[in-house]
Amino acid sequence: MSRDRWNNRLVFVLAAVGSAAGLGNAWCFPYVCATNGGGAFLIPYFVALITAGIPVLILEFVIGHKFQGGAPTSLANFGKAGEILGWFATFISFVIVTYYSVIMAWVFDYLWYSFSIAWEGDSGGFFFGSILKLTDGPWELGGFSIPVLIGLVLTWISIYLTIKDGVHTVGKVVKWTVGLPVLLLFILAVSGMTLEGAMDGINYYLTPDFSKLTDFKVWTAAFGQIFFSLSVGFGVMIAYSSYLDKKSDITNNAFMTALANSGVSFLAGFAIFSTLGYMAASTGSTVAEVSTAGVGLAFVVYPEAISLLPFGAIGQTIFALGFFIALLTLGIDSAFSLVEGTSTAISDKFDFNRKKTTVGVILIGFVVSLVYATKGGLYWLDIVDRYINNFGILVVGFIEILVIARLMKVNNVREYINEVSDIKLGKWYTILLGIASPVILGIVLVMTAYTEIMDLVNKTNYYASYPTSALILGGLIMLLVTLLASVIFVFFKTKNAKENSEEA
Ligand code: PHE
């Protein structure tokens, strides 16, 4: 059977941008930027983009384009270790989608409650109490939270409907899920800027604090943000580019993806911080006091800011719907790209029917995600996210750039790219990919591991307040199982391999 193809170039770029631009852009970037030096953070951010993000993205496009298969099949051209790496990246994607889908479930819930601004008055109590029904610790699961369960079913149904017929249906959906959130974020940013106090918010977001640049954590934050937000190191971009035909452009597509992704992050910062500036002004506090990271920002602080807006009930509902529809459309194409990465990997290796494989991955994904739909689920989500994100991806990206690029011969990679691409890469690219990127990423990786270990040992990190047993299960064991599964999958014989060995 011939391989599925994207309908055209635009659809591929939209799908890649859709995967990249997600929740990471909307709620991580603005806060990470604000607290890691504001405008000065853009320096490490762009250094990370240029020395790691774009080179790895281009490399992943090359790998999928050249070998025409999911991450494991493509990387199997470099031997068993290559295939293990491919599976490791794939299973990381799978682990991520099991909790990413739960965050999408909360978004579905908030869409519903936007009609009554149901969180008004006590947005924290509403989120942790009424929606999550959070227990006292990770070992107290406490059964399902029904609102989360309902949202979760809706999320997986949406994922199924989008990808059931492969990249063709994806193509139809990404036209909406990429354009709409950008438009909505733009409207939110513009109307946010008209509010009193908005400028204080923007100042908090962007005023440069160059002294932060000497802190290594700021640099690791920048690299972490780039990898997660650009979706590199997960095998997803390899899977997506494997549906390109061999004449398609690489460099220009990669630059467009990277620029659009950073643009969405930057825009989201304006939408979020203008409104938080207003909130600070109207409650008589500072922006630093009201803003928080991640989950709390999107589901507690920003909703609360909406409930304070001077637009009346209908205006607030419109604002809330705008925000949550933006989150939904940003997140859903990232979520299904993670599933696509996994099902492409499996169907390519085992020669399984694409559609059945997708359904299988969705069903297993749904079952695993149920863990996080329990009342103690948030704790597990937090722990798993921390460890898979901090180490898993950086490791994959680092090995890709250090080993795979070398095995493919860095100069040949450049020639391969230049043959098909609009933008030709000069000799500098060989130096970047061959020397600068692996050295820089290596340093970042060592520093990340070092800071993480020191934080745990000195208990200077709030993760240390989780029971050690939960950190071991959700962090260490989860990573080991992911790795073990990757090794086991390599040794499953595929139909093709069996036929070949019988012939021999
Ligand atoms: N880049 C997505 C985000 O920012 C998450 C993601 C990571 C999606 C990896 C696919 C692969 O939310």
Image (cartoon, grey):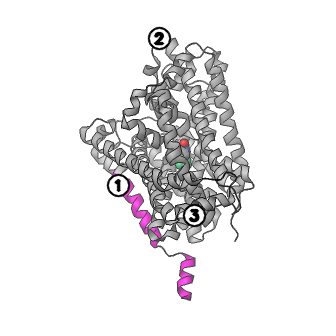
Label 2 within 8 A of ligand 1 by Cβ: no
User: How far is mark 1 from mark 2, CA to CA?
Assistant: 46 Å
Q: Amino acid at mark 3?
A: Asn
For marks 1 and 2, the one nearer the N-term is 2
Query: In percent of the image, x 55 and y 66: which residue is there?
Result: 74
Task: Determine contact: label 1, label 2, CB under 8 Å.
Answer: no
Circle 1 is placed at which residue position?
Answer: 477
For marks 3 and 1, the one nearer the N-term is 3
**Residue 353 position in % (x across, y down):** 63, 68
Of residues 405 and 229, which is closer to you in this image? 405
* The label number, if any, that marks residue 66 in the structure image: none
User: How far is mark 3 from mark 1, CA to CA?
Assistant: 39 Å
Q: Which callout, 3 or 1, points to the residue nearer the camera?
A: 3
Q: Is residue 344 magenta?
A: no
Q: Is residue 282 left or right of residue 15?
A: left
Circle 1 packing at 10 Å, graded few (<14), some (14-19), many (20+), is few
| Image quarter of residue 151 | top right
Circle 2 is placed at which residue position?
Answer: 284
Circle 3 is placed at which residue position?
Answer: 412
Q: Is residue 491 magenta?
A: yes
Q: Which callout, 2 or 3, points to the residue nearer the camera?
A: 3
**Residue 278 position in % (x across, y down):** 55, 16
Query: In percent of the image, x 57 and y 48: which residue is there?
Result: 335
Query: In percent of the image, x 55 and y 37: which residue is there?
Result: 25
Q: Is residue 280 left or right of residue 464?
A: right
Residue positioned most to the front: 427
The magenta span reads: 476-504
Q: Amino acid at mark 2?
A: Gly
| Image quarter of residue 141 | top left
Which quarter shows the N terminus? bottom right
